[in-house]
Image (spheres, rainbow, N blue to C red):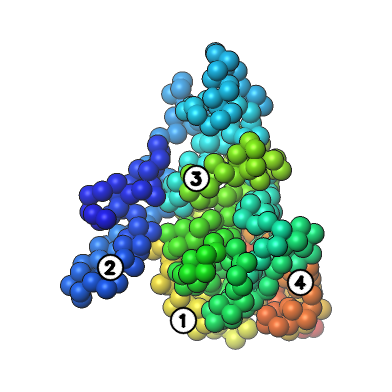
Amino acid sequence: MNLLTNTCKLCVSEKNVRKNSECSRNIRNFAKEIETENETNKIIIYIIYTMKKFDPATNIQKLDGRDPFRGVNPSISDSATFAFEKAHLMTDTFHGETEGYFLYSRHWNPSNMALCNALAAMEGTEAAWVTGSGMAAITCALLHEVKQGDHIVSSMTTYGGTFAFLSNYIKKWGVEVSFVNFQDLDAVRKAIRPNTKVLYTETMNNPLLRIANIPELSKIAHENGARLLVDNTFTPMIFSPYQLGADVVVYSMTKFINGKNDCVAGAICGTQEYINSLIDVNDGTAMLLGPVLDPMRSSSILKNLHTLHIRMQKHSENAMYLAKRFKEVGFKYNYPGLEEHVDHELFKSMMNPGYGFGGMISIDMETADAASKIMEIMQDKGVGYLAVSLGYFKTLFSNSGKSTSSEVPEELQKEMGMSEGLIRFSVGLDNDIERTFQLIAEAVEESKK
Ligand SMILES: Cc1ncc(COP(=O)(O)O)c(C=O)c1O
């Protein structure tokens, strides 16, 4: 492989052409290839790699989004079906042999394609596909990898809906799942069987905010003929799991990516070949289960995606501020941006610079009753809303064990270290975050009365 000049095979698609030297995933592969090279070569590779910074926001900014009438936003495609000038073009499109033709909106439509191009640019993948919810993205991506008799190794700490799908639902199809502590890489290795097809994790997990070691998990998956699927919902732009070695990246766009809490939506990002297989008219899981996102929504989410980098910076800045203030006053808090977090160094080794450590933070109030009381007072005082979900411009808080992780049995909650008094905050875009801190501190004091 000529690292400096050749076009990257992973990135060769119409919208996304890069040189080998511009693709951090390729540089990693290259570094693996030259493992036996002499020290000078290794140093050269290291220098090229560290000089290169993957920047999701700039990748999105480089796209030209004008419509055929020179409108600055792509036109909304308000059609379920599309006409062909010639009958053979319809047949060829069914066989995937045409360029620039659309068949039917469950498969592709121009508005979804515009959003998908931007998501692929953000992740540095060749392609993406958008779904009507995050769960649709997760379930389609998982079902597409496995058949009856296969095995999945999943992190034991995931969003409750994902956990319920993997522990209760997928077994109907004869697929076995082992839940493992993904912080323990040996335990992950040991859980792998000859029929393991998938390793599944969230980059930053829900709700414990532990960080998965994506490069190592990718190695473990690939050494064992499995694929690594990663849910990056909590940390868009901060982490780029595909660049770190994941095979497929899924999102609940309901959260930070859209950021407005006005819809549910999801995304699946991967190679062109993979996305094509997902929407194959004969056996593509997404095409046949039909969870496609509505084009009207795609077009509104695309506009919100263009401000994601600024929002992530502000969410992170505010969460970091709260973490420091919680530390000063002695709250039992959890935030991966501070040095004492067990995964702080791992976080730094994987993060894209400039987006901070994320907008998620938690405090532990020990009991569910104490958590409930404080949350009600915080809502009355105007800290934000007692609501599930995240990535909104207002601060949202919920008691994870009693809400978004309630599908996880209490025993397992204890095993993974989740306190029953854990309050998870999705920190908003508050302009005066010291005021927010003061209100939270007052709520904690008042709850003791
Ligand atoms: C990490 C994570 N992944 C996936 C989902 C599911 O997404 P949706 O509600 O859009 O289906 C959620 C929802 O809370 C989540 O927190």
Q: Which of the labelled discs sits on residue 408, or is there none?
A: 4
| Disc 3 crowd, CA 10 A, few/some/many (<14, 14-19, 20+) | few
Determine contact: label 2, label 4, CB under 8 Å.
Answer: no
Determine contact: label 1, label 4, CB under 8 Å.
Answer: no
Viewer can see residue 304: no
Quote the CA–CA distance across marks 2 and 1.
34 Å
Q: In the structure shown, which secondary structural element does the residue marked by tag 4 occupy? A: loop
Q: Which residue is mark 3?
A: 273
Quote the CA–CA distance across marks 1 and 4.
29 Å
Reading the chain from its start, which is encountered first: label 1 or label 4? 1
Q: Which residue is mark 2?
A: 34
| Disc 2 crowd, CA 10 A, few/some/many (<14, 14-19, 20+) | some
In front: label 2 or label 4? 2
Mark 3 near ligand 1 (CB under 8 Å)? no
Q: Which residue is mark 1?
A: 339
Reading the chain from its start, which is encountered first: label 2 or label 1? 2
Reading the chain from its start, which is encountered first: label 2 or label 3? 2
**Which residue lies at the image location 70% right of the left edge and 62% below the top edge?**
149
Task: Give the left or right position of residue 230, taking residue 68 as reference.
Answer: right
Amino acid type at mark 4: Val
Across and down, in percent, residue 326 comes to 58, 79
**Which residue lies at the image location 45% right of the left edge and 46% below the top edge?**
126
In front: label 1 or label 4? 4
Across and down, in percent, residue 27 comes to 32, 60
Quote the CA–CA distance across marks 1 and 3.
41 Å
Quote the CA–CA distance across marks 3 and 4.
35 Å
Give ligand 1's quarter of the image: bottom right
Viewer can see residue 274: yes
Amino acid type at mark 3: Glu
Q: Residue furthest right?
A: 369
